[in-house]
Image (cartoon, rainbow, N blue to C red):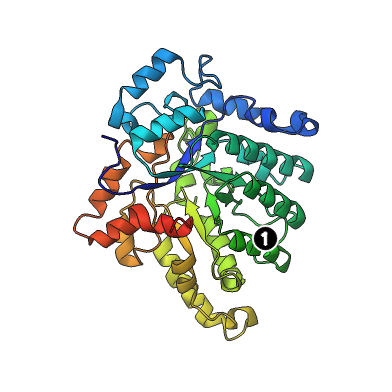
Amino acid sequence: MAYANGRVFYDADSHIMELPGFLKDYADPDIRDKLPKELDAMAAASGLKDSMTKDGHPAEEKEKLIALGDGLISGPKNYQALGAFNGSERSKALDLLGFEKQLVFVSFSAGPAFDLQMDLKTRYGAARAANRGMADFCSGDDRLLGVGVVSLDDTQLAIQELEFALDSGLSAIWIPHRHCDGKSPGHNDLDPFWARLQEAKIPFVLHIGGARLQIEEAWMNTGRPKPLDFLSGVEVPRSKDFFRVHQEAEKFIGCLVLDGVLERHPNLQGAVVELGASWVPPMLDRLDMVAKTWSKIEPDIAALKRKPSEQILQQLSFTPYVFEDVGNLINQSSPDIYLFSSDYPHTEGGRDPIGKFSKYLEGMDESVHSKFFTENFARTFSLS
């Protein structure tokens, strides 16, 4: 029996663990030498071994992983996990995990595509390479829903890359949750991008890594030793990084709403993944308060026909961390906006995410369980 059983489970977060040279292998020749070399160092810090190749794990190691059966989710993580970097292995992993569909993100390769310090050609060339690699990884199994990467810094290039991602069969578009190289995501120039997503019934996605993760170093200066972070070989963010990790995403979502993007594109869907959800209920209240107050003096806000909370409940969804009480979040807001995720094969997803989330939902109506594990994902990703 698979780990996930008894209902349809859709997984809103999983990852490729890119092997060294991943981006260069898929990049156009004229940008290969411009791609950052530190991506390979990040792979080494995450447990990569020389025996791990494009063909997957060594046969003996692969057999041991398969033998874990429905315990695979609690087994080795990162590069050591079954299907971490090989698409056919991931298909076998999905057989054991039991997820009906699984959203797939890159782990390291979005960085250059989102980096404002990179020139535009390199930035969008890195996106093209990541999207080719993602399409390749997911090509053998329609349960794998690949996520493309596109920055909104140049509208024409963004739409070109969006079309490439659509033609490649990718199922969502990850955009950085920062300003769009000097423009709000609600700028008039970007409306064709949002309109194309809506037309294609493809959601946009915000994900950790789409904006600065670490708090500014001045806030870490206490006169005492600093906690280690992922740059020091530790994978998880520090406490001060974590408590503010959602802030840029909240800013991005707030601007989308107040600039009227969701209002102008009422069938556009989006998801906020691996940025937590405990901030969502107060954001709904705060945006409603802002809209009510500033509608008296700002024409764009006065033109909104739906309250911000209504727009968000109808068009956005969020993945709570495995240690966030999703039952409590639902009681504070709505059962319609939260998604189950495993974060496979990353460690942050825990070793029994279904069990953890199910405990938070104990005593709640079956319809709430169904929405969290199944229906909200189906709506967001146009599966129903």
Image spot of residue 285 (x, y percent): 43, 72
Please give the residue where the numbered disc 1 appears in the rendered image. Answer: 193
- In the image: residue 237, left or right of residue 218: left
Left or right: 174 in relation to 313:
right
Q: Nearer the viewer, residue 55 or 50?
A: 55
Looking at the image, can residue 83 be seen?
no
Q: Which of 373/124 is in front?
A: 373
Q: Residue at x 35, y 36 (%)?
A: 97
Left or right: 125 as drawn, with respect to 22:
right
Location of residue 195 (image quadrant) = bottom right
Q: In this figure, what is the number of numbered marks?
A: 1
Question: In front here: 183 or 104?
Answer: 104
| Quadrant of the frame with the N terminus | top left
User: What residue type is disc 1 on?
Assistant: Phe
Q: What element does badge 1 sit on?
A: helix
Where is residue 94? Give x, y as percent.
39, 35
